[in-house]
Amino acid sequence: MVTLDELVGNGLLQKPSDTAPTQVERAESNYKSLDSFALPKDRGYQQQFADVYFLRLTKIKPAVEQVAAAAWKNTVLGGEKATKVDRVLDVRQGHLCWVAGTVYMDMPLKPNVLDDVSKDRWISGPTTVENYFSNTGEETLMLEDESGRLKLVGDVLKNYFLVTGCIIAVMGTENINGEFEVLDLNFADLPPQPDRWSLSKAPKIPKPKSEDIEMTDSSSPSQSSKKIALVSGLEFSGTDTSYAMELNLLLEYLLGEALDPTAQSDVSQISRLFIAGNSIAKPSEHDPATDKKALKKYGYDSSSYNPLPSQLLDTFLTSLLPTIPITLLPGVQDPANVSYPQQPIHAAMFPSARTYTAEPTPSPSASDEPGWLDAVTNPWEGEVEGWRVLGTGGQNLDDICRYVDSADRLGMMEAMCRWRCSAPTAPDTLWSYPFQDDEPFVMKTCPHLYFIGCQPEFGTKIIDGPQGQMVRLVLVPSFAATKEIVLIDTETLDVSKVKISA
């Protein structure tokens, strides 16, 4: 219980003053969204999915071979020098060599669409298998390219995160069983990283007056830097109100209400809010809207639709948008397409908040200004305060976790960066669009900030690359489970966590 003395001490209750209150203004957001994962309007699904892996191998293999050639150019074992082999089927028994290709993991628990077709079955929704690996050791690791597949064995493979779809180079020799004994392994590592403000111009900072310099302590910063807020897993529901109080407190915190002047000044430096997936909760098993028995017209039961969750989200966004811009990424539970990359949630879902979206233009190049509410794709790439940012709603990392018997999600995030692929398991076990001309999941540039939403708990680390790249990795926890949001300093990329509790 909070006492009256504590409220007075915190500055929430004060006696009337003749001094006018200081007006606090929200920091301006410097933001540019890229259409890296936008699908064409005339998209079709008649083409084969194999083109995705061929495109990925074509884009990443040269970088992998360059790293491998530098690492193994002077490798000599048993008097034999390691040589490059162009195709996996050109490997010869007893010959020390190295070859690059795509990893494929044959796992007994992994879903296989060919098995479903051969058994005259069809999957109507994404798989619900928790893990693809088993404790029996029945998994088989292979390396493939356009020529065929080669089985990989060796203890060195246990030291790396490996999943279907990542591009690697292996060095070793083929044994009498036709298996490739791996002695060493290499990835492409981090791609080139652009400089800050490479897409937009840095804002001009006004020079302080001479009298201000004299009165300012040199050991203290002149003003607090901007911040961006990351939240995911809001999970607005029409039936469950167990954390409705925390959602209201989150709204008041971001608006600066019910805070003392010092805290209001800090919150005013949050220049943008990112909502990274799962803004809508899963339908309840005992949802009254879905329990109704009614006749279906054209295979659709209108009485089973519950509009309350989207209405609550619309109200939440409308309350925030007059004071802070919002970037909204869809998640697996949100009203967007299931396949990766998910396209933006349609503005029709927000009858009130859509007034803050960008006005439709006759051509994509007519206006580059995003709306105050920017509904974007998942994954999303853009520039925030000059930093290159990559973010997802969590499906890519969740699917990788099914391959690996480990809880090190930050390690898997780092592996994705070093593989140069943000969704390696697509389209094998992560549903995705069958691209033919480009593979957008390949990281062409190295982000400065990489965040993934809807995670079990908060986590962060910094990784570096061979050319001086530095990437801040952030796991954004689900707000419904943890009641936590993440703040990132836009000057230092330092990360802090805020706990909302009632």
Image (cartoon, rainbow, N blue to C red):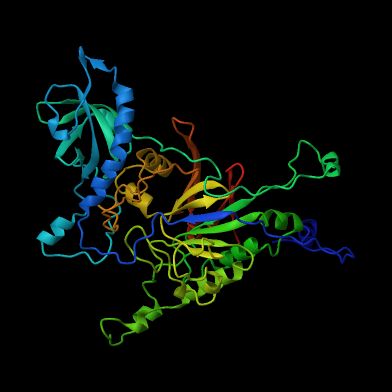
Q: Residue at x 19, y 28 (%)?
A: 85
Q: Which picture quadrant has residue 66?
A: top left
Q: Position of residue 1 (x, y in %)?
A: 69, 61
Q: Residue at x 39, y 63 (%)?
A: 343
Q: Residue at x 13, y 34 (%)?
A: 89
Looking at the image, which is closer to me, 169 or 3? 169
Please indicate, yes or no, whether residue 298 appears anywhere in the rendered image.
Answer: yes
Left or right: 399, with 4 as reference point: left
Q: Position of residue 20 (x, y in %)?
A: 85, 64
Q: Which picture quadrant has residue 410?
A: top left
Give the position of the C terminus as an image quadrant: bottom right
Q: Position of residue 148 (x, y in %)?
A: 14, 40
Q: Position of residue 24 (x, y in %)?
A: 74, 60
Relative vertical location of residue 332 with respect to residue 172 in this rendering, above or below: below
How many callouts does the rendering have? 0
Please indicate, yes or no, whether residue 133 appears anywhere in the rendered image.
Answer: no
Q: Residue at x 40, y 67 (%)?
A: 282
Relative vertical location of residue 187 with respect to residue 42 in this rendering, above or below: above
Q: Which picture quadrant has residue 298?
A: bottom left
State the residue lying farthest toward the right: 18
